[in-house]
Image (spheres, helix red, strand yellow):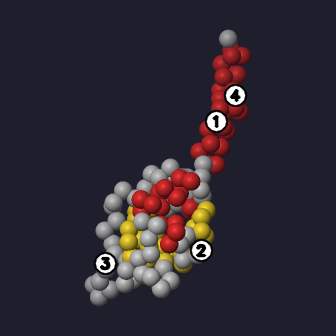
Amino acid sequence: MFQLRLFLPFLFTAVILPGTLAAQYSSGDAGQYVILSAQYGTERNHVDVTGRLKELARQDRNFRMGNDSFGVDPDPGHVKTLRIYARGPNGSERMFEYREGSVVDGSQFRGWGSGEWGDGNWSGHWEGRDHDDHK
């Protein structure tokens, strides 16, 4: 009986725990930032593409983005930008920009492949959140 008490914790530590940790940290959804919203276009004309970005993320970690990716050309004749607004681990918000034709790599975004993000908590605009630099 004494040997069994020693063996069970060893079994857990040596076999089960490493597998659990490996699954957790090898997941493609373990990035630092949580996406709040995604906008595509120019400052003058842009559209919310959060839903479409979720669909793309579920299919592939990396993709080359452009009008065909999002099914829309919000400002014909002008180079577009994908802006992903995200919240970091410390609660601060950050904007990621991808120029039309560039490759989007979702590895830095938590929940990327599962689409567990973009739930409408973004209240900013194309330029980012409203703020007053004079306060």
Residue receiving disc 3? 130
- Please tell me in which quadrant of the rendered image residue 130 appears: bottom left
Q: Earlier in the sequence, mark 3 or mark 2?
A: 2
Q: Name the front one of labels 4 and 3.
A: 3
Q: Amino acid at mark 1?
A: Leu
Q: Secondary structure at mark 4?
A: helix
Mark 4 and mark 3: Cα distance apart in space = 55 Å
Residue 47 position in % (x across, y down): 38, 72
Classify residue 123 as left or right of residue 25. Answer: left
Q: Quadrant of residue 19?
A: top right
Residue corresponding to mark 1:
17
Residue at image x 60%, y 52%?
28
The answer to which of marks 3 and 1 sits earlier in the sequence is: 1
- Say whether marks 1 and 4 touch (CB < 8 Å): no
Q: Which residue is mark 2?
A: 102
Residue at 65% over, 19% down: 5
SS of the residue at dot 3?
loop
> 21 or 52, which is in the foreground?
52
Question: Which mark, by number, is residue 10?
Answer: 4
Residue 85 visible in this rendered orientation of the protein: no
